[in-house]
Image: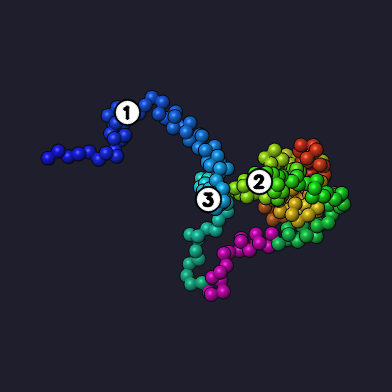
């Protein structure tokens, strides 16, 4: 009795016998490089409910990819030492406590927050000129006949966080162009009389509108949170100060950079 080979394994068999084509891996690499363009073309071509389902699926994939990337990143975070346990029985009222060091950190954080709250209004620019929505947002016409006008493009400088996952372009209401996104600012320390190029952590408050704060729009007078760990400033307890507030003193969209003064 002659045994017949399964018909679906002929490619694997040919590769075992003769190996790969000389340009196989190059073609494979190029195909993978073209894949995002193919997927975006498909996303543009789809309409209605199919488009919604497809974009939902892509959105989930992007989130998964970001999570995977974060797992690979080495982050130096302070974690509670689980193996250090007190010997013997612990009273019920001490079970939920992590230890003295944690309590000290919390008390320092509370003190820092109180300080920030007390000096809330002592900023270099107490008053700024109002900026209208028609100046900040440009109306983008959409649809086949360009009649729909519900999309807006941000024309001012803005900050977008690391963990931001963009919505499918078809359903994105506020577009923040890559050319207008800033990650660092020139921050001047008023006492040291020196300027440092520091990374932005977040947009704390834009005095123009809560919507601008939410979108991360940076205009003159905006209060930013900047990472000042490289400055080496320490608290009374000897801990390094990580983030501090700074107020923007220029028009970033005109100058192409963000100049700010540290609030000390």
* Res 15 quadrant in image: top left
Q: Exactly how many numbered labels are in the figure?
A: 3
- The answer to whether residue 24 is visible is yes
Q: Nearer the viewer, residue 250 or 153?
A: 153
Please give the residue where the numbered disc 3 appears in the rendered image.
50
Q: Main secondary structure of the magenta part?
A: helix
What element does badge 2 sit on?
loop
Q: Dividing the image into 4 quarters, which one contains the N terminus? A: top left
Q: Which residues are magenta?
A: 91-109
Disc 3 or 1, which lies upstream in sequence?
1
Q: Residues within 10 Å of mark 3 (few under 14, many from 20)?
A: few
Q: Is 11 drawn above or below residue 205 in the view shown?
A: above
Please give the residue where the numbered disc 1 appears in the rendered image.
19
Q: Is residue 92 magenta?
A: yes
Please give the residue where the numbered disc 2 appears in the rendered image.
143
> Residue visible at 55% across and 56% down?
79
Disc 3 or 2, which lies upstream in sequence?
3
Verify CB contact (< 8 Å) between mark 3 and mark 2: no
Disc 1 or 2, which lies upstream in sequence?
1
Q: Disc 1 and disc 2: Cα gap in Å? A: 50 Å
Q: Disc 3 and disc 1: Cα gap in Å? A: 41 Å
């Amino acid at each position: 009795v002659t045994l017949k080979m399964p018909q679906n394994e002929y490619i694997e068999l040919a590769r075992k016998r003769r190996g790969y084509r000389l340009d196989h891996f190059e073609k494979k690499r190029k195909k993978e490089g073209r894949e995002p363009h193919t997927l975006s073309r498909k996303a543009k071509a789809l309409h209605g409910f199919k488009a919604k389902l497809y974009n939902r699926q892509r959105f989930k994939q992007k989130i998964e990819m970001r999570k995977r990337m974060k797992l690979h990143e080495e982050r130096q975070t302070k974690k509670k030492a689980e193996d250090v346990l007190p010997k013997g029985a612990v009273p019920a009222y001490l079970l939920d406590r992590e230890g003295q060091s944690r309590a000290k950190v919390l008390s320092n954080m509370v003190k820092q927050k109180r300080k920030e709250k007390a000096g809330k209004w002592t900023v270099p620019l107490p008053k700024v000129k109002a900026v209208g929505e028609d100046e900040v947002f440009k109306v983008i016409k959409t649809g086949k006949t360009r009649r729909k006008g519900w999309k807006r493009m941000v024309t001012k400088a803005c900050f977008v966080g690391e963990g931001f996952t963009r919505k499918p372009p078809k359903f994105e209401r506020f577009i923040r162009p890559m050319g207008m996104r800033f990650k660092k600012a020139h921050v001047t320390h008023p006492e040291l009389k020196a300027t440092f190029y520091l990374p932005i952590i977040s947009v704390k408050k834009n005095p123009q509108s809560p919507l601008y704060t939410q979108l991360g729009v940076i205009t003159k007078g905006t209060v930013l949170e900047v990472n000042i760990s490289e400055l080496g400033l320490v608290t009374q307890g000897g801990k390094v100060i990580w983030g501090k507030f700074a107020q923007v003193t220029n028009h970033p969209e005109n100058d192409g950079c963000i100049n700010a003064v540290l609030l000390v």
